[in-house]
Amino acid sequence: MTAIPETQKHVYSPAELRRARYLGITYIVLALFVLWFFAVGSVGEGDSTLKLVKPTDRFKNFPNLVLPAAIFSFVVAAVFASLGAVQLTRGFKRLGNVVLAIVLLLFVFSFLTWAAAGKSFSFVGMMQETVKRSIPIALGAMSGVLSERVAVINIAIEGQLLGGAFVAAVVGSAINPWVGVVAATLTGVVLGWVLAVMAIRYRVDQIIVGVVINLFVLGLTSFMTQRILNDNPQFNGSEVFKSIEIPLLADIPFFGAVLFKQNIFVYATFVLVAVLTYGLFNTKWGLRSRAVGEHPKAADTLGINVYGYRYLNTLLGGAIAGFGGAYFIQGSVGQFDENMTNGRGFIGLAAMIFGRWHPVGALSAALVFGFAESLSGKLSILQTPIPSEFLGMAPYIVTIIVVAGLVGKARPPAADGQPYIKE
Amino acid sequence: MELQLRGITKRFPGVLANDSVDLTARSGEILGLLGENGAGKTTLMNILYGLYTADEGQILLDGEERHFSGPGDAIAAGIGMVHQHFMLVPVFTVTENVVLGVEPTTLAGIMNMKEAGREVREISTRYGLEVDPDAVIENIPVGIQQRVEIIKVLFREAEFLVFDEPTAVLTPQEVEEFFGIIRGLRDAGKAIIFITHKLKEVLEISDRVAVLRRGKVVGETAPADTTQEALAEMMVGRPVDLVVDKGVAAAKDVVLKVEDLYVADDREHMTVNGVSFDVRAGEIVGVAGVQGNGQTELVEMLTGMRLPASGTMELSGEDVTHEHPRGIHSRGVAHIPEDRQRSGLVMNFTITENMVLDTYYSAPYSRGIIMDWDAAEAATTSLVEQFDVRTPSISIPASNLSGGNQQKVIVAREFSREVKLVVASQPTRGLDVGSIEYIHGRIVQARDDGAGILIVSTELDEVMALSDRLLVMFDGKIVAELDPKEVTNADVGLYMAGATP
């Protein structure tokens, strides 16, 4: 008998190789981009001043971040070029995503120094805005995490946000803002219940149910706005919640203003992310939910009520999205507008995928999207040569790039989107 | 303790799955439940486990009647089941899988994983089931996964353990270890029900054997009082030839030659890692290996269904590495696929339509763009007769046939052309003893008619019996080339597990 000696050649899988190559090329392209536009473009423009505190802050004399615009971008371009070279020749192996994060961060700063060259601009204000704008996205993403962890795909987050916002406006104006928030949450639950019954009980295609709910809510709220709210403004003007300063923490320069001088929705989101993270990975409910999403049959043979968990989490997710809808009213402008959610629910879904179905990941992703939104808002003030319509596209471009797999392939719950049929 | 099934009857539309079955399991005893696929073993156990409800009959536990409306009830009554397809969550750790459904908790449903891990470790030492409680399931071998399934059952304090075809996924060494574990459990006073269709195993491990045929218990005996032949006859209902009857191979020219082949799976993981071998006309080359070691991707590549990352494949000296499936089979390659219902047949097509799936586009079955169904039906009628396909009509859908007859349709279609090479993947999986006998005979005949044959199977006994030359595949590589007449199952098993005897 002859044993054939083992060959030692290790072959990288095509996917690994492809991704490493793409990243390397991306870094080089970014280096050229930074060099050409930001570095060369800011020569002779002087320093950029990024303000880190607001005049109302307690330590308002905290120094600002002053960067020599041109030199900074030249350095960034050089760093990108060398990172790209290393990525193409050796690869960063496990550090790949850390390097990617650093590159994106530096790119953004290079962009900011270019845009603000010779001027000063409120970085702290932009970050404060980032956190605010990321809230509905993050809440939508949490709703998605909850339902997809039990394998129910929730495309209807957009509709739940919009429906929540409408009810929050009407009930908030008619009764009081707190009741409005509760009613918005319940609206999310009702829409979640429709999704759950269709998806779990009648096994209708979950994408189709979700799309139908979105269209239904959009049509209904638009109709009611035109027919009722426009003629009865007393039903469309809720009180907006004020920011609450957290004692001591709010005095920390920069971070205090960004994180601890916000309204109740921001704090609730942070608490929710913490609770969900702990719940999913440390409690009985979390373990069972994840089992139902990964291998429902295994859960069923252990006496776990697969349908029960699917209903429960889809309804909870609906509640969170409905609560997120109230943000648009009580947490923001106090008044309902047709289609005012404007795709935040879908961006929330993208944040969930980008965050790999993990609450903390999803929150981080939501912050990235929120940053893209607030960037496009603030930059119009700085009068950059970029058309404002183009800046408005930024969040969506970021979404596409991110979901197209720049961060590597994320693995959804194994049974995601599949109805479970009990024998 | 004693568990009694009395007069269990279960009907499915058109089928009597269990027909008044009586069965008794006792503590400290291993009961072998033998029967062919479709004999009703799994249905019976699903009734016991609360997944189905019986139409008639009773379940008695120590003489007291019990009703199980779900697995939860059965678990509470001390019945544990190790399913044929493991019920483990791949991304969970061993401990998480074990405690799922009966989590030890502190306040407010917060799990006490430290306590859980301790209990897992305790069970694993007490019964000799070595596992790492913190390992993630998808990273551990199948043999260890089975131990996790057993620990899961023991963690729920089961007294009656049901194993459904537990050895199907194991290497011969793992089977030996597994038998050791089962004997240990029996000696610890547990009652074991061991479901299988493998005669050898049931004789080796059981204290008592019950044979199920067409939903009925047709006999009960002790292993000492019977033989494989007698059991086979009881199981099938007629005498069966258990040995493959074949003469000496007369190997001639090389028909298939692959060199340094690398193939990736759907997730783009490289599962075939540098495979080279050849197959000659007039010989049967077997590829043994535990499932998931690259055989599926290898066969898909050989039949044109998957492109390789690198390497070459030649048919009678012609390079066909990048050929499409039609290019491959029009060069005389017959393919019996691993999954007959997914890639062998179109289940909603009639037998006639299935029979001409690979030749419909040429004469005599079509003229230009018009099909000649008369010609197809004539050919099908003769093939059905020639290959002993049992069917009331050739115009019923393939889904109406039993597994064995479906497989015969595939064999008939593939062998009805002129064949230079046969690639057969798991050709007898899930078939009854009679069909296995028939299909083995056909394969040997194709060899004697001068075709080269490549058999890929996870059933070691099958490749040992059929092959003239045996290759062992492990982790995407051919780790040994052996003469099946000179090696024992145990040696091959070691290679299959990645070790060297």
Image (cartoon, coloured by chain):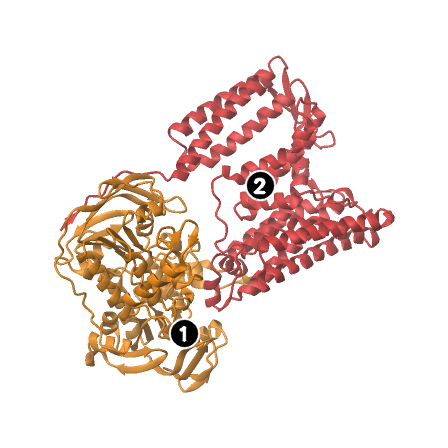
Chain colours: A red, B orange
Q: Is residue A247 above or below residue B225?
A: above
User: Which of the numbered marks, if any, corresponds to residue B367?
Assistant: none
Judging from the image, mark 2 belongs to the subunit labelled A
How busy is the neighbourhood of tag 2: few (under 14 within 10 Å), some, or many (20 plus)?
Answer: many
Q: Is residue B141 above or below residue B271?
A: below
Q: Is residue B26 above or below residue B184?
A: below
Q: Are marks 1 and 2 on the same chain?
A: no
How far apart marks 1 and 2 lie (CA) works out to 48 Å
Nearer-the-camera pick, B437 or B395 = B395
Nearer-the-camera pick, B455 or A87 = B455
**Coordinates of residue B212 in the picture (x, y in percent):** 32, 78
Q: Quadrant of residue B130?
A: bottom left
Which residue is denoted by mark 1 in the rendering? B43
Residue at 48% across, 80% down: B67
The reply to whether residue B133 is visible in this rendering is: yes
**Coordinates of residue B434 in the picture (x, y in percent):** 27, 71
Q: Seen in the image, is B375 located left or right of residue A410?
A: left
Nearer-the-camera pick, B343 or A55 = B343
**Coordinates of residue A25 in the picture (x, y in percent):** 46, 28
The reply to whether residue A53 is visible in this rendering is: no
Q: Amino acid at mark 2?
A: Ala
1 and 2 marks in contact (CB < 8 Å):
no
Q: Is residue B460 above or below residue B314?
A: below
How busy is the neighbourhood of tag 1: few (under 14 within 10 Å), some, or many (20 plus)?
Answer: some
Which residue is denoted by mark 2 in the rendering? A365
Q: Residue furthest bottom?
A: B63
Q: Amino acid at mark 1?
A: Thr
